[in-house]
Image (tube, rainbow, N blue to C red):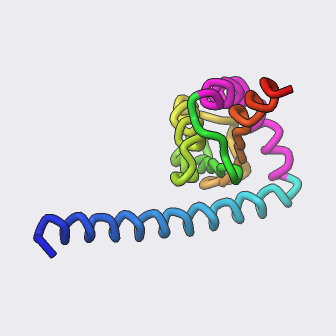
Amino acid sequence: MTRCSFLVASLALCLLAAAAAESDELDSLVKQAGKNYETEEGQSYLEAFQHAIMPVFANALDTCSSTAPDTTNPAAIVFIVAADGTVTRLIYSTDIPFAGCVAAKLRAIKTLPKPPHDGWVVAVGAANHHHEEQAQGKSQ
């Protein structure tokens, strides 16, 4: 194995390990968001959250659906919100191009309604079937 191919192989292993760690973190945060939603305060916050993100989210879905490939599984996008409503992190399914496109547009959202407590986790899902629907429409 040449030095260059060893470095490439090492880099690939590091990227795979990082993706696995990110996936574990994303899964954990999605579960936390689910637990948050199970509470009365979580359900109330979700309504305010959805109202706040909807204009940007709807535009992102519309824009990205035609440019990104269809999804096999829904993409997860997680917001972590500080007590003052500042978005401190935005994490998404990096293995789904549609998620990357939508998340890039959601980064424009810097503040949201104040959550029940600091570090509040909210997850949304996004799926893309635009290309499949277009193909079905043309074949009918």
Residue positioned 12% across, 71% down in the render: 2
Say left or right for 8 vs 137.
left
Say left or right for 100 vs 72.
left
Q: Which residue lies furthest to the bottom in this view?
A: 1
- Secondary structure that dominates the magenta span: helix
Quarter in which the N terminus is drawn: bottom left
Residue positioned 69% across, 51% down in the render: 72
Residue positioned 85% across, 49% down in the render: 43
Q: Give whichever of 51, 15 is nearer the camera.
A: 15
Q: In the figure, 59 relative to 110: above or below?
A: above
Q: Residue 127: x, y in percent?
A: 71, 43
Q: Residue furthest front?
A: 139
Say left or right for 87 vs 17.
right
Q: Give whichever of 96, 57 is nearer the camera.
A: 96
Q: Residue 123: x, y in percent?
A: 69, 50
Q: Residue 132: x, y in percent?
A: 73, 36
Please give the range of residues in magenta: 41-66
Q: Is residue 51 magenta-colored?
A: yes
Q: Give whichever of 132, 31 is nearer the camera.
A: 132
Say left or right for 50 vs 10.
right
Q: Is residue 7 magenta-colored?
A: no
Q: In the figure, 81 relative to 51: above or below?
A: below
Q: Give whichever of 62, 35 is nearer the camera.
A: 62
Image label count = 0
Residue 35: quadrant of the picture: bottom right
Quarter in which the C terminus is drawn: top right
Residue 111: quadrant of the picture: top right
Residue positioned 83% across, 39% down in the render: 47
Q: Residue 87: x, y in percent?
A: 56, 42
Q: Residue furthest left?
A: 3
